[in-house]
Image: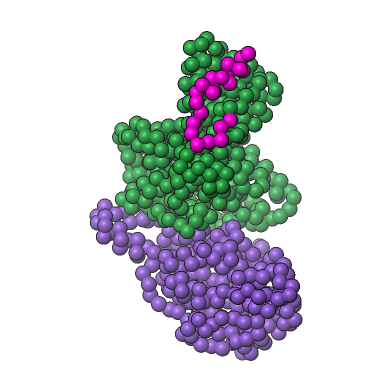
Chain colours: A purple, B green
Amino acid sequence: MNETALEAACQVEAQPQNPVEPFLRMDRMPHIWCAGCGIGTTVNCFTRALLDSKADLQNVAVVSGIGCTGRVAGYMNLDSFHTTHGRAIPFATGLKLANPDLQVVVYSGDGDLFAIGGNHFIHAARRNMDLKVICVNNLTYAMTGGQTGPATPSHVISATSPYGVFEPAFNLVQLAEAAGAAYVARWTTYHVKQLARSMEEVMKKKGFCFIEVISPCPTLYQRRNKMGDGLDTMKFYKQVSKLRNGAPTSECALTKAGEIVVGKFVDRDRPGYFEMLGTQMHETLGDRYAEPEVMCSEC
Amino acid sequence: MHADAKGVLTGVHFLDGDHACCEGTLAAGARFSAGYPITPSTEVVERFAQRIPTVGGVFIQMEDELSASIAIQGAVWGGAKAFTVTSGPGFSLMMEHIGYAAMTETPCVFVDVQRGGPSTGLPTLPAQSDMMQAKWGSHGDYGIVALCPNSPQECFDLTVTGFNISEEFRVPVMMMLDECVGHMTEKVVIPDADKLEITPRRYTKLPPSEFRLYEPREDLVPDMTRAGAGYKFHVTGLTHDEHGYPNMTVETQDRLVRRLVDKLKPFSGDRALFETEYVDDAEVVVVSYGITSRVAQRAIQMAREQGIKAGKFRIISAWPFPDQPLNELAARVKAFVVPELNLGQMVHEVDRVSQGRAKVIPVSHAGGTVHNPEVILRAIVEAIR
């Protein structure tokens, strides 16, 4: 652990109540995640981002797909949706379009967002839909027992690649940038301060934002690949991570044991979906265009 | 409550079924649609895309049917009334989200303009081949409502009804058109907005501290809320308790799944939608729906002209199946003749209800065109022999 994280832990103990508690459904604890899993760490960072960004919590919604990270929605004390496998982004798209006042956060895993949901990811980025996508990338399908996923690096042993992965993996940050994301960053669960700050930043940024968080799955990924436990993984992340803000995303591909480039890679302004819709309709329909409002007849 | 006049195109029109269906969605208050193009259904959303910017709402063309069928559900939880439109191959892709809508009790409407299958089949030609899929296509036990219009006028009227049912029962409703009904053009009368009764969403009146998202009222349907209203609720496709929290016990599963099915029981009885003609003295009754009911009408007339006591039972709400009215008929007729543009789907339901009391004669057709009325007439003649 680095000094910052220790300091944060001390502060927590001094409080009568853990400061993240109001953001969680405490009646659902304990959670299902394994010891050493990184998802809880990312949730801690997310709650800090909610605090620091002074988000209007009534208007923050979390949408998850299926998988270990898919369970995040269920633990957040917010309007939350645990959708179908891969479909968090299109659900979130509908939610956002029906109620533009909502800040919609998609919180899901690498398999969910980039295999079964990969098509939705690239199209939402293309549209610059105003969604904040947080991908906890544990490099495997953890919920189902550690199978090869679209982000599993070569040579890794998995439940379905017992002799080693030979397919190339997606470089998620490069994919996000190429598809049109307005904001792209990557951290590991070792970088709690930076991750929380990134999350805070995207809460204030318009457009399609993507944060990849490299996270351990000690139960399936690390164990099977003899990479130690959760703490060993923190040491590994500390050792191999290299901060390169603004690095070309094409240089950020992950390998099994090599460098993990972290930082904010993309932060650009592109017109968002609503803006483009409004511009086009005003141009062609003039005064006849009826701006969509919050579509709630009864509220 | 009355319809919002902004969406109601009051007047007498000459419309095809797809366009009339679109006007039905607007009149019912739909302000969101997500779609993916597929013949012969695309005209519904083409018209919506043209109309909605001046009404106030959003149409988004999604990347596939999977996303269209879940985007509408996101919109519903954001407060909108929403629907999607498709045909056979797209309907197959939407199955996972029909299950999700049933499980999460998300009121929404799926329009399926049926064409010949299986697979890519007959993209431009009619069939009624998705009738069983509408009920059983997603995994698990669940309830849906399916309505079968047989004219452009009904495409309008029943779409409004479909939205109302979806809100009252918090259930996905399937509009089971077919290529003929979707593409035939007829007179469509759209009434004034204040003549259209619209069922509002069942938003809870309880404060957040007392509200539970899946606690049913006496009619087995729970009240609802929407994102941003301060309720901090949770929705999941997992088996869940009254809070909406995952709870994978045998007891919770049993309670939830039975309720999802049982809440729609009224449609087997006094809420069933159907139309009968000449049944009082009928010895044989033709049971049909959609475009086939219009062909059957001719066959029944020809039978009557020959002195055969033939009657008509037109299914309008196909799911839940109208058990009770057909059960009553089964006790006093000799036979049911069931023409369908498939190799036999709803005929199994007629047979189940008949319980051997009346003969059940299928008149199957693989699709691509409609029946020849003579073929149905032959079945009627055979039935009374």
Where residue B40 sits: x, y (%)?
44, 43
Q: Is residue A19 visible?
A: no
Q: Quadrant of residue B9?
A: top left
Residue lying furthest top in this view?
A: B307
Residue pictured at 63% horizontal, 70% vertical = A149
Where residue A176 sits: x, y (%)?
49, 73
Q: Using residue A60 as the reference point, say whether residue B99 is left or right of it.
A: right
In the image, B282 versus B105, the foreground residue is B282
Where residue B214 sits: x, y (%)?
60, 49
Residue pictured at 51% horizontal, 11% vertical = B306
Q: Which residues are magenta?
A: B364-385
Quadrant location, the N terminus of chain B: top left
Residue A167 in the magenta stretch? The answer is no
Q: Is residue A150 visible?
A: yes
In the image, A66 versus A231, the foreground residue is A66
In the image, B297 versus B67, the foreground residue is B297
Where residue B202 sits: x, y (%)?
50, 45
Q: How many marks?
A: 0
- Give the vertical position of A250 relative to A57 (above or below): below
